[in-house]
Amino acid sequence: MSKRIVIVDDSSIMRKMICNLFQSTGNQVIGEARSGREAVELYKSLKPDIVIMDITMRDMDGFSAAKKILSLDPQSRIIFLSNLDKEQYSAQAADIGALGFVNKHNLEELLEFI
């Protein structure tokens, strides 16, 4: 079944790569955000099935945005995507309530969560 996805990353190139990955598998990217603050607003208006979110962003980081989104909708599905150390940050992602953590060098791993 096709999923409705929002992609959050401050890099337009990374957002495009993620969009291409999901669209090639029949999923629908319904929105893109450049910051955590934009992600929260997009989540409120679009109610996506899944949010793919970078951690390190200006304005509001991914962890803070995820906490806000999960407070609005505890059933929201968030996957973190980052170049940060997976071992160090995957536990923090799980503590927040995220589905998982994927390194940006292994984008195909995102498909395992869909």
Image (cartoon, rainbow, N blue to C red):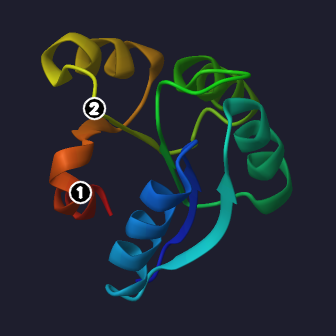
Q: Position of residue 2 (x, y in %)?
A: 45, 82
> Dot 2, how many residues are within 10 Å of its Cα: few (below 14), some (14-19), or many (20+)?
few
Relative placement, left or right, of 89 versus 105 is right
Would you identify the image quadrant in which residue 7 lies? bottom right
User: Closest to the observer: 95 or 87?
Assistant: 87
Name which residue lies at 25% across and 64% down. 111
Q: Position of residue 17 (x, y in %)?
A: 39, 67
> Dot 1, how many residues are within 10 Å of its Cα: few (below 14), some (14-19), or many (20+)?
some
Name which residue lies at 69% across and 21% down. 60
Q: Position of residue 107 (x, y in %)?
A: 23, 57
Going from N to C along the chain, the mark reached first, 2 or 1, is 2
Circle 1 sits on which residue? 107
Relative placement, left or right, of 103 versus 65 is left
103 vs 3: above or below = above
| Quarter of the C terminus within the rendering | bottom left
Circle 2 sits on which residue? 83
Disc 1, SS = helix
State how many labels appear: 2
Three-letter code for the amino acid on which mark 1 is drawn: Leu
Q: Position of residue 81 (x, y in %)?
A: 36, 40
Q: Nearer the viewer, mark 2 or mark 1?
A: 2
User: Closest to the observer: 94 or 56?
Assistant: 56
